[in-house]
Image (tube, rainbow, N blue to C red):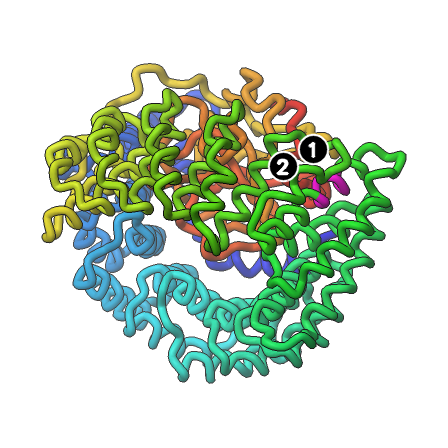
Amino acid sequence: MRTRLVALAALFVCTACPRWTTPDQGAKGAGQRPPQQTQQSSELSAVAELEDRRSFGAGRLLEEALTHRDPLLRRRAMLALGRIQDPAAADTLLKGLGDPDPGVRGEAAFAIGLLGLAWEPLADEVKVKLGDALVTAEAAEVDPTVKLALLEAMGRVVTPATQDRLVERLSQAGDVQARAALSLGVAAKNGGKLEAKALTALLPLIRKDVATATRYGAAYALMQSKAPTSRPALMICATDDASEIRALCAKGLGEVGTDTDAVTLKGLIDDPDYRVAVEATRSLGRLAGKCRSAACPALGALADLSFRIERLVRGDTAGGGQPLLALAQQGLPAQGKALLTSLRQQLRAGTTAPDQRVKKDAANLDCRLAAALDRINGSIQEVMTCGDGLIDEPRRLALGLRELAQVPAKDPTRRANEVASFVFHADPKVKLAAIELLGETPSPASMDKVRSQLVSSDHVLAAAAAAASAKLGDKTAIPQIRALAQKAVTQVDVAPVIADALATLDAKEAIVDLELWLGSSNATIRNAAAEALTKLKGQPVVASRVERPIDAVKPPPLPKDPALVFTTEKGEFEVKLFAQDAPYTATSMYTLAKKGFFRGLTFHRVVPDFVVQGGDPRGDGEGGPGYTIRCEVNHRPYRRGVVGMALSGKDTGGSQFFVTAAPQPHLDGRYTAFGEVVSGQEVVDSLLEGDKIVEVRTKP
């Protein structure tokens, strides 16, 4: 159930969004258009096409962003430059901060923030230049909405100057204070270290008499700081009236808490909002990993998860299942073996329940906990018989193999011999997990079995074998990996993996292969080549921008107010598509749904209190529809229930999507938000790994 904070946080986030008319909205109209409007629409379409091609149009886009008479087109051009993410546009964007139109200034600030989040990291001197300009512009800005946009960008362009300004703005009440606090948290997530003065200024902002939006921003920043000095404040806000603040502070205690904090976290395991219980459970798991004596308060506190099992047996997957899934994913040290065994025994009551959904959920979680036990044991044992026959063998094996990969083998040769046969399993999920595990298990047997998969007709498995060979230091695999590289110039989903493998193995003979990649029209492939060539040549190699080809076939236009209705094993949820903010992405997903693409696929990734992810035809996180689409990063914030496009790099979207369980500010400006759950969020909350999509219907 949504708490009061969700509505308040959503209101706050939107105060940082532009209030000016968006370019796409301005281009829409009904009926016959006058000549001036028709010309405007044509010019906006031309800008959109340049953006789609990732092209400056021989400098035309740069010029129009600054000089076009229509501010609506200047705004749209600024957005296009931000989405292209080319440092060559930096000077144009900086000049845009001085545009007479506040909408253009705000869009320029947003675009600078996108440049700061570019998949190819900015050079330090460019970042400093952008940061200094943001600070100067913010000091002179009189429009309150643009000022917020500038502060938002400072969280993405992380420099000492931008962090200092954000700390200064913590002293101002209202939206500025809230935005500055949240941006400091985003900056910390993006690699910025919060200095003592920032922490000192944030600490008073978590008091209960402070506005909710500011408390949330401060809690987010303190959680992301991972600073031991934040612990007292996190202890205070762990009892906040707003559940999403409690969840943030419970999460932060997992990094900086001590044994004595187990009492506070134990109380949160029974929180009415399952997301708070999830974060308390994770943090107790982390604290248990730090215990150095037999008496471990965190493990004792986790015994209270038996109450969550009771809720699961009553049919409450969100309240009962999600905290248990969080514990299994977090894992426990060896002294937690008895607790995991006890929880599995209690789950058996669910596997014999008359309700088929309860039975499957209990079996699903039983296998998750079994895999956590195998991680402790260092061997595939418990997953072989878990789930009371309700979970298929490939899923059980893949779970166990992936958990083993998280811990080093005491006897690598023995482990390699134990799991080597799984690389020949009939199911690709099992093969992939086995290859990845062998890559973490240095032994001659591992090298032999991994090398055999370099010739796999499944390019995902072959690329995984290349990565594993590189981890094992197997230079004899270089010729075969080079052969993969010669094919991967058109395979954006595996190209970065193969390039990194060649760089790790110091395969200088592959320089000639990777140099061909620099001409790819896909930025991810170019950037992967540049990064690998930099390592191989010992000097910086920068990938130049290459225009994308124009799509030969345009998809049909979307109907008015398009939506997708997801029917799952646990009920339905409806997603309203952001057709104006992300038209290309929304159209692609709508078209795939219309074709029945999602029917029978699973939610292969569920991270409680973070995202639920599905849409992969392979089921292992590596699949897609057979094509990729460009990113359309927009102003839509990642609130609870927002639907985004999963990526493995710039312009690598396909069919995999995720739905957020809580606000995720660090995703803003990074991933394309293309929809929002408008009904059935409780169904999303109930989903576990492996739950199926029965079908996806389109509306209208």
Residue 242 sits above or below residue 461 on the image: below
Q: Position of residue 675 (x, y in %)?
A: 54, 38
Using the rendered image of the protein, determine whether residue 444 is visible from the camera's viewpoint.
Answer: yes
- Residue positioned 73% across, 60% down in the render: 339
Whether 220 is among the magenta residues is: no
Circle 2 residues within 10 Å: few <14, some 14–19, many ≥20: many
Of 372 and 225, the residue lying toward us? 372
**Is residue 338 toward the left or the right of residue 64 in the image?**
right
- Residue positioned 41% across, 39% down in the render: 647
Answer with mark 1 or mark 2, whichever residue precedes in sequence: 1
Q: Position of residue 373 (x, y in %)?
A: 64, 52
Span highlighted in magenta in the image: 361-366
- Residue positioned 47% across, 39% down in the render: 417
Q: Are marks 1 and 2 in contact (CB under 8 Å)?
A: yes
Q: Position of residue 610 (x, y in %)?
A: 57, 51
Of 691 and 425, the residue lying toward us? 425
Q: For residue 165, what is the image quadrant?
A: bottom left
Which amino acid, mark 2? Arg
Q: Position of residue 685 (x, y in %)?
A: 69, 45
Which amino acid, mark 1? Ile
Of 523 and 620, the residue lying toward us? 620
Secondary structure of the magenta portion, mostly?
Answer: helix
Residue at the disc numbered 2: 396
Residue at the disc numbered 1: 391
Circle 1 residues within 10 Å: few <14, some 14–19, many ≥20: some
Tally of numbered discs: 2
Whether 362 is among the magenta residues is: yes
Using the rendered image of the protein, determine whether residue 36 is visible from the camera's viewpoint.
Answer: no
